[in-house]
Image: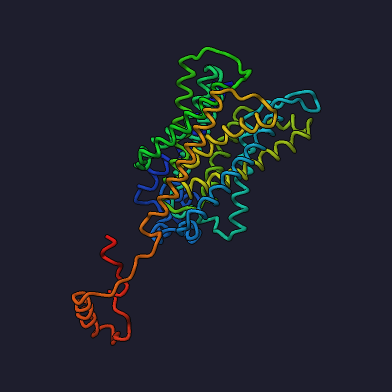
Amino acid sequence: MAHEQLFTYTVSFGSFYLFVLISFQMVKSPDFRRDRDRLSRLVHACVVGDEDIKRKGGGAFDADESRPESFAASAMRLTVCSVGIQVSYLLWGLMQERIMTKPYETGELFRSSKFLVFANRILALFAAWAMMCYTGEPVVRCANGAPLYKFSYSSVSNIMSSVCQYEALKFVSFPTQVLAKSCKMVPTMLMGYVVSRRVHACFEYVVAMGVTAGAAMFKLFETNDAPVKNTELWGIILITVYMVRDSFTSNWQSAVFKEYKVSSTAMMLYANLFSSAFTALGLVLTLEGVTVYAFLVANPSCVLHIVTMAICSAVGQLFIFYTIKRFGPVAFATIQTVRQFLSVVLSILFFAHPINLMMGCGIAIVFLSLGAEVFHQWRRKRTSPGHKPEPLTPPSELESQRDADSMSDVGDHAGDRSDQPSAALLRPSAARW
């Protein structure tokens, strides 16, 4: 099965990037004309983008998201995003477990994980399109001048990280799985420097390592019935590739957000467009789609479960892409780590499982680290220069004379402005500096 997946994804990815390579050569030709036909427009949009939109700058749909706001408002917005992600993917996980582990009417299990990925992506694609139609965002020009092939990178990395994660579980021990799932924040921060040269403060690394250590300690000392297996070199390689690709996905999306000022729904639209195309081609090449269709016809209740799971995934993606755009990839990695941590905590509280000393220490370390980060952000907001208005002071004699001279210099061109207040009256106090 692993070799079959590798073959189908190699064919689908290779086919697209071969088209991209050919398109670059076509655009360089002196005979190329963008408006010649539909293929020319597609080639140009794929590898060049729309220069007219690029020259105009960011779209109108970014105005509200770039507006500064108070710490309380920002914290509330992040809380809503966190809750939306937690609830959506908690329900998504429950439905996925139901689909893959329980038999249906014919007594058979649903075994096509590739089709589940396709169902999630195609419904998220239509959800993004519907959201853009509802908000009035132009779907045709929502890429905001970005070459379309750049959206494919995050789709490829997301698909490959999922494949590596599932395959790695066959070759690694439980502690290795725990560490891999808990260590998302630090690789995400390091990848941020690689992708966009984003530099994080030492305090942020301390918080990330604190959350990682606490979550790992909690899960390592948790009583579980996970199968014990020896860690193999191939499993370590797959886990490493998973972490690299997973951290690249959100950082690349964040870089595209900043460079082209696309909206979160536009990113969701194109990311799922490429993911849907890649997985659909894999279903066609292996004829797996025919087998899935026959299963769904014989087991109609499975259709409802798949649709419910896809809806949860689509809603979760709306929150995810907005979180990455508004708060950055590190905040999203923190939410993901805390989500896994809280799911276990809620399970313990709900089913009254015992908590040992080391698990309690892990809980304390996670919440202390997150609390320190919240306090740091609050204090930085309070002490930032733009938080409080600068005190106004009357102008000195030298400043008044300089203002008068400058007003007389422009008087011939701008008319009489003697009724306007001097600019020095609005100058902040020098003592503050």
254 vs 151, nearest the viewer:
254
Q: Residue at x 42, y 54 (%)?
A: 382
State which quarter of the image contains the N terminus.
top right
Where is residue 41? Give x, y as percent. 47, 52
State which quarter of the image contains the C terminus.
bottom left
Where is residue 150? Give x, y as percent. 44, 44
Q: Residue at x 30, y 84 (%)?
A: 417
**Looking at the image, is 141 positioned above or below residue 305?**
below
Left or right for 28, reference 282: left
Left or right for 178, reference 404: right
**Looking at the image, is 9 positioned above or below residue 387?**
above
Q: Residue at x 45, y 21 (%)?
A: 237
The reply to whether residue 175 is in sight is yes
Where is residue 318? Give x, y as percent. 58, 47
| Quarter of the view holding residue 310 | top right
Which residue, as the protein is rendered here, is positioned at the far top?
230
Left or right for 269, reference 59: right
Figure disc tally? 0
Which residue, as the protein is rendered here, is positioned at the far right?
105
Q: Residue at x 32, y 82 (%)?
A: 420
Where is residue 195? Give x, y as percent. 38, 40
The reply to whether residue 149 is in sight is no
| Quarter of the view holding residue 119 | top right
Q: Which coloring applies here?
A: rainbow
